[in-house]
Image: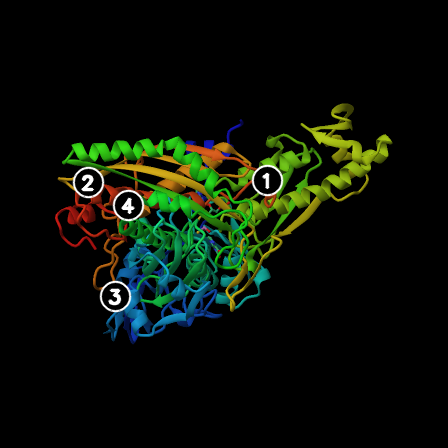
Amino acid sequence: MTRNPDAVFNVLGKTLYVDDIAESAGVLHCALVTSPSARGTYVSLETAAALALHPSVRIFSATDIPGENQLGTAVMDEPLLAEGSWEYRGQSIALVVACSRSIARKAASLVRITGIKELKPVLDPREAFQNGDIILSSRTQRVGDTQAAFADCAIVVSGRADSGGQEHMYLETQGALAFPEDSGGMRIVSGTQSPSGIQKIVARILGLPMHLIEVETRRLGGAFGGKEDQASPWAALAALAAFHTGKPVKLYLNRHDDMFMTGKRHPYSSDFKIGLSSDGMILAYEADFYQNSGAATDLSPAILPRTLFHAAGAYHIPNVRVTGTMCRTNLVPFTAFRGFGGPQGLFVIESAIYEGALALGMDPSVIQKKNLLASGDTFHYGMPVTDCHASETFERCAQKAGLHDLQVAQADFNRKNRAFKKGSAVFPLCFGISFTKEMMNQGGALVHIYTDGSVGVSTGAVEMGQGVGRKIVLIVAHALGVAEEKVRIEATRTSSVANTMPTAASTGTDINGMAALVACEQLLERLLRLSAQKLGLPQKSLVFKNGFLLVKEGDTFRETGKTFTDAVRLAHESRVDLSSHGFYATPGLFYDSVAEKGSPFCYHVYGCAVITATLDVVHGTYAFDEAYIVHDTGISLDRLVDMGQVEGAFAQGLGWAALEDLKFDDSGKLASDTLSTYKVPDNAFIPELRVEFYERANPLAVSNSKGVGEPPLMYGIAGYFAVLSALKAARPERRAFYDLPMTAEKALAFLMEEDPC
Ligand code: MTE
Ligand code: LUZ
Ligand code: MOS
C-alpha cells in the first residue's frame, strides 16, 4: 500500500495552515473586546484610550456592519457583534484592529464597556426548561405504546443520566484572512468545514451579493465539527475590517481565546425509564433529553434529532417514546462535535440497560446481545433495518476479546483482591450516515485533465486530517486508470465548486467522492469514444489501466500502444472538453418531521467494542487495560486512513466518556479554559488497542465503502461502564450513577461513599 503523502508532509511540518500563509504588506491584525460576564446589558463603548494607543488602531462595533448583523443559520438569533446586551461570557462586543497583534490586544484591553447592568444567568438546561426558555419546540419520536408495555414488564427502572460537553481541541485554532479585491468584493481564506457557508454569511454581513465573495480552504489542522458552523464569526470579522480599511486583515485566535470563545459538544441532562421481561428482553423505553443548547441556536436543531434517531442505540425495542428539547442557557452556543448528538443519546440507553441489568441481576452484555438489531426489523423512526451487521460484529468482538473467559477471570480477580478491582463493558454500535437534513445531502466536483495527462480535482470536501483528499485521489486514479501521483486535489474554493455543504456527518467521501466519480465517468466517455473511432475498435472494449489504453478481450487485456496521455492529446486536438463537473445527491432519503417517520439515512455503520479497566480502590484512580474493536468499514478505501480514523475517534470518545471535564463555574465562566485545567487523553491513557475491520461491500456508497469519520467515537462509551463495573465490584451496595465523564474524582467520591454527581 502506498502512503498518504499528506500524512508524510504533516509529520514533516511542511503543510501550510492559515497562520502559515505569508503575510501581505500592510496586513492588519485583530483582537476582540468580549463580554465580561454571562449575561448583561450595557449602554456604550468608551474607545478614546484604545484609539490613542497607536495611529493604526481602528475599532468596529455592530453599527459598522453594512449588511445584517447576523450569524444564524437555522434561527436568526446570533449577532456577530453585540448590540447593547450579551447572553454568554466571551461573546464578541467589538473588534479592534491594528498593525500588530500585540497592539490590537493592548488596545482591546483599553476599551471600556459602560453602563453595565448584570443579569442573573441561567446555566442549567432543566432550569431553562422550567422557565419555558426553549428553542423552537420539543420533538418526540415514538413507536408502539410504552405505557401499555410497561404494565407487562417484569421490571421497570428509571433514572437520570448526564453527559458533559467536550472541547474540540483541534491543533489549529480558528482563524481567517480577508483580502479586499478590486471588484469591491472580498477573497477570504478561512479555516472552515464549510466554505460556501462562510461565503453566504460574509455576503450577508457585508451586504454584498455572494458572487463578490470568494472563499478558499486548503486544509484544516483538525475541526471535529467545531468549524462546521463556528468558523464564520472569525471570517466575517476579518472581512468587516478589510471592508472598512481596504487592507488585508488576519484574525487568529490563540488557544485560550479559542477555548473560551467557541462552542463545544452539547452537555445533556436526561431522564430514562426502561422495562424488561424477566429474561432480559427490552420491551419499552422512554427518555427525555434536555439539551443544553447555550445562548444561540447554531446547529442545535440538527443535533437534537440525531440524538432522537440514536436514542435506542443498536437495539430493537418494540415500544419507544423519546422526547428532546433544546434549552437556551447563558453559555457559549454549543455546536457540532463528532457524533453530533448521537453519543449523548447512546449514553442514556446504555445507562438504562446497565440499570436494568442491575435490577435483573444479569450482566449488561447479556441484555445487549439479546436485543441487538437485525435485518428485517424497523427503527423506531420507521426506517427498515437492512444489511445489519450488529450481531456479527458483536459476536466477532466478543470472540476476539474472549469475553466470557475475561468476565470469569475478572470476577475471580475481584474475589481475591480488595485494593484493586477490574471491570469490563461492551458497546455495540449502530450509527446512521447522511445529514439528517435531506437538503444537505448533495455535492459537486470539477475535474480537469491537463494536456500532459495529469489531473486536477476540485470538490466541496474540506481536508481536516480525515483523509478525504486521499480517498478522492484513489477514487479518481482508479476511475481514470492513471497513477495516484497524476491526481492532485485542489484547495476547496467556492468559485470552483459552488453551493456546497459542510464536510460533515461522515459523508465527505460518500458525497464528494461520488461527485468526482460522476465527473470522471463523463470524461472517460469522451476520451474512449474518440480513441475507439481513431483505432476502429468498439468503445466498450477499451479501458485505461496504469496510464495505458488497453483492449479488453474476455478476461485478458491487450495493449494498443497508446497511453492515457495520447488519448487526452487526441481529445484536445479534436477540440473536446477536458473538464467536467459532476454532481451527486444521495438517493432514497425522506423524512416527515411532523409524523417523525421516514428514512433519514442512506445506511448505518455497525461495530462493537469491549473495554477492560482496573481500578485502584484506595486512590480512585483507574487505567484502561485493553480495548477490542470490530468496526464495519465497508470495503475500506485506504486501510491506513481508516485505521487512523477508528483509533483517533475511539481515543476522542474515551476522552469524552472518562477524562475531559468541561466545567463552567457558577457565574457561567469556563473554568477549564487551558490545557492545564482541561485534560485530554494522552498515549498513556489509551489502552492497548486491537482493531479489526469487518469488511463487507456497501453498495450504497462510493466504491462499496462506508463513512468512518464519526462512528468509532462512540466506542469510548464502553469506557464509562467498564470503570462503573469496577466501582460496583468495590462497593456493590452503592447505587450506580450515570454522570459522564467518569473522572477519577467521581470514582473516588463513589468509593468514599460521597455523592459523585
Ligand atoms: N479526523 C481528523 N483527523 N480531523 C478531524 O477534524 N473530523 C471528524 C472526522 N474525522 C475530523 C476527523 C468529523 S466530526 C467528521 S464529520 C468527519 O471526519 C468528516 O470527514 P468525512 O466526512 O470525510 O469523514
Ligand atoms: N451536520 C449536520 C452533521 O448539519 N447534519 C447532520 O446530520 C450531521 N451529522 C453528523 C455530523 N454533522
Ligand atoms: Mo462532524 S460533527 O459532522 O463535523
Q: Which amino acid, by three-letter code, is at mark 2?
A: Thr
Viewer-proximal residue among 723 and 59: 723
* Mark 1, secondary structure of its residue: helix
In-image side of 358 versus 458 (left or right): left
* Residue 697: x %, y % from top left: 58, 38
Circle 1 Cα neighbour tier, 10 Å, few/some/many (<14 / 14–19 / ≥20): some
- Spatial CA distance of label 2 from label 4 is 11 Å
Residue 22: image location, x then y, percent: 45, 44
Q: Nearer the viewer, mark 3 or mark 4?
A: 4
Q: What secondary structure is found at the residue carrying circle 4?
A: helix
Q: Is 742 located above or below residue 111 in the figure? A: above
Q: CA distance from mark 2 to mark 1?
A: 44 Å
Across and down, in percent, residue 92 comes to 35, 63
- Residue kind at label 3, given as amino acid type: Ser
Q: Is residue 750 left or right of residue 383?
A: left
Residue position for label 3: 37
In this view, the residue in front, 564 or 284, is 284
Residue tagged 4:
658
Residue 31 visible in the current orientation: no
Marks 1 and 3 sit apart, C-alpha to C-alpha, by 51 Å
Residue with the most extreme right position: 536
User: Around disc 4, counting alpha carbons within 10 Å, would you say few (fewer than 14), some (14 to 19), or many (20 or more)?
Assistant: many
> Mark 1 or mark 4, which has the lower sequence index?
4
Instruction: Assess whether mark 4 and mark 1 are in contact (beta carbons under 8 angstroms).
Output: no
Label 2 CA crowd tier, 10 Å (few <14, some 14–19, many 20+): some
Residue 562 in the image: above or below residue 208: above
Image point (43%, 53%), residue name:
227
Write down the quadrant of residue 719 in the picture: top left
Q: Residues within 10 Å of mark 3 (few under 14, many from 20)?
A: many
What separation in Å lies between label 1 and label 4 (alpha carbons)? 34 Å
